[in-house]
């Protein structure tokens, strides 16, 4: 606590943004995800780390990580001191033992009865044995990192089996490949979005050489990369229906789900009108059984809320997963970071997209047909339906009035968009997919 007092006398106040409200003060501490801020008037307030603005979260996370590191170092020092103490106890025992032995010999030489010394010696030996036994378990509880072996492709195949009508799979020695057209066939899309960039789902050719690639020989990363400062471009995992899963933070570093960018299924469309999820969609638990609900691009599986044997989820580590029977896997949750906090496995990064983008390679490419649009403030998507073969209608509500984007494409790749505004006026534009 004293260190904290010293810290604030030197620390300038910072203006924090908590749930959109500005608060001036300085960081005191973090406990179980709650951040404590001391205001200028001495009043201490606390808020969830996730309620702070993203830039606040980034600087606070750094501070918290730094404090944690200091605490860990202290703990290591503490442990070391304790070990030294127990070594000292050992030497005291040895010293006393030799002393009593000497006493027995002396008594024998003088023909006196050494009963008392025998008794003391046996008592000490017994006590020492107990003490040693007691110490044993602490030395045997080291958490070993498993040696990883090649993943059996049939294990990954099971993840995609329930969606084989819309997903094709194949594998070679290095990768398990997933091919899809990029439009989910078993659930609706877009409904529920309240922060919309005017994008709509169109098919993507994640096929052939542009298929998704899941490594079959996962390796642990020496220092796993955090999702808060990496992977803000491209997919990080693949869902059972072949739809890519992106970082829960959008490309501006905001929690996409929390700010209303995602539909009821955890997805939305990117700048290329490419549909993708930003959270591991838990609705796949309904069809997954005890299998994973997604595969991460580092080659590790992502499970739902249960372990592979159906039992309750075990404690998660800082990457949002844990070692499990000679491998590693992640788990999903309904709150941030949802499914992965850091990439536990090694991945190759695209050198042309430095951090925080750090796109993973290989990565299937999405392709649009029209220029990307901007956010339509106040619009919420209220309906989305197929109106024919390769034809959809998206309904949104703005100022309590309904508006529509109707679109369709033909076999030659000609896309026709009809925009019907809240004033009822309609405009039609055509684009051709290259
Ligand atoms: Zn997105
Ligand atoms: Zn698990």
Image: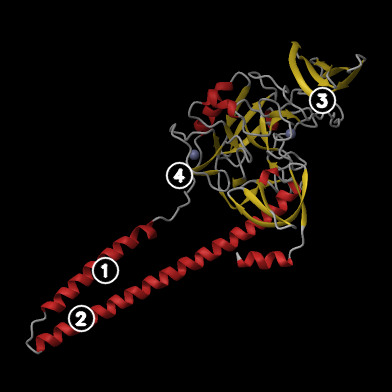
> Reading the chain from its start, which is encountered first: label 2 or label 3?
2
> Reading the chain from its start, which is encountered first: label 4 or label 3?
4
Q: Position of residue 263 (x, y in %)?
A: 70, 26
Q: Secondary structure at mark 3?
A: loop
Residue 147 shows in the view:
yes
> In the picture provided, is 205 more to the left or to the right than 125?
right
* Label 4 crowd bin: few (<14), some (14–19), many (20+), radius 10 Å: few
> Reading the chain from its start, which is encountered first: label 3 or label 1?
1
Ligand 1 is located in which of the four quadrants?
top right
Residue 115: quarter of image:
bottom left
CA gap, disc 1 and disc 2: 14 Å
> In the picture provided, is 391 more to the left or to the right than 308?
right
> Reading the chain from its start, which is encountered first: label 2 or label 4?
2
* Residue tagged 1: 128
* Label 1 crowd bin: few (<14), some (14–19), many (20+), radius 10 Å: some
CA gap, disc 4 and disc 3: 48 Å
* Residue tagged 4: 326
Query: Foreground residue, 21 or 53?
Result: 21
CA gap, disc 4 and disc 1: 37 Å
Q: Secondary structure at mark 2?
A: helix
> Reading the chain from its start, which is encountered first: label 4 or label 1?
1
* Label 2 crowd bin: few (<14), some (14–19), many (20+), radius 10 Å: some
Which is more foreground, mark 4 or mark 1? 1
* Label 3 crowd bin: few (<14), some (14–19), many (20+), radius 10 Å: many
Say whether mark 3 is within 8 Å of ligand 1: no
* Residue tagged 2: 100
Q: Which mark is residue 379?
A: 3
Residue 338: quarter of image:
top right
Q: Position of residue 196 (x, y in %)?
A: 79, 29
């Amino acid at each position: 606590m004293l260190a904290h007092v010293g810290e604030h006398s030197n620390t300038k106040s910072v203006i924090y943004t908590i749930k959109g409200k500005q608060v001036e003060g300085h960081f005191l501490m973090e406990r179980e995800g709650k951040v404590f801020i001391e205001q200028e008037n001495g009043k201490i307030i606390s808020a969830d780390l996730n309620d702070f603005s993203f830039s606040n979260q980034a600087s606070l996370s750094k501070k918290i990580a730094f404090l944690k590191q200091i605490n860990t170092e202290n703990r290591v020092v503490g442990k070391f001191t304790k070990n030294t103490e127990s070594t000292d106890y050992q030497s005291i025992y040895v010293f006393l033992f030799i002393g009593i032995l000497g006493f027995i010999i002396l008594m024998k030489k003088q023909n006196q009865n050494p009963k008392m010394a025998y008794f003391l010696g046996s008592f000490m030996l017994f006590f020492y044995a107990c003490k040693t036994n007691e110490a044993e378990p602490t030395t045997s509880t080291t958490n070993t990192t498993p040696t990883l072996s090649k993943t059996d492709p049939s294990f990954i195949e099971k993840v995609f089996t329930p969606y084989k009508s819309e997903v094709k799979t194949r594998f070679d020695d290095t990768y398990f490949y997933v091919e899809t057209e990029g439009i989910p066939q078993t659930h609706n899309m877009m409904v529920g979005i309240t922060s919309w960039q005017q994008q709509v789902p169109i098919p993507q050719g994640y096929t052939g050489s542009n298929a998704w690639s899941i490594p079959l020989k996962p390796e642990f990363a020496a220092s796993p990369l955090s999702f808060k400062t990496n992977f803000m471009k491209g997919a990080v995992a693949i869902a059972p229906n072949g739809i890519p899963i992106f970082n829960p933070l959008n490309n501006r570093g905001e929690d996409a789900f929390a700010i209303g960018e995602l539909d009821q299924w955890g997805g939305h469309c990117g700048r290329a009108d490419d549909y993708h999820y930003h959270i591991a969609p838990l609705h796949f638990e309904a069809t997954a059984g005890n299998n994973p609900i997604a595969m991460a691009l580092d080659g590790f599986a992502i499970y739902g809320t249960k372990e592979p044997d159906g039992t309750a989820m075990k404690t998660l580590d800082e990457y949002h997963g844990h070692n499990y029977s000679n491998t590693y896997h992640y788990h999903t949750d309904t709150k941030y970071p949802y499914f992965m906090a850091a990439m536990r496995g090694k991945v190759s990064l695209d050198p042309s997209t430095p951090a925080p983008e750090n796109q993973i390679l290989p990565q299937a490419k999405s392709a649009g047909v029209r220029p990307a649009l901007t956010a339509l403030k106040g619009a919420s998507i209220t309906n989305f339906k197929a109106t024919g073969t390769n034809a959809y209608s998206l309904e949104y509500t703005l100022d309590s009035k309904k508006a529509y984007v109707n679109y369709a494409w033909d076999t030659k790749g000609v896309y026709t968009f009809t925009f019907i505004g809240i004033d009822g006026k309609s405009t039609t534009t055509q684009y051709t997919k290259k």
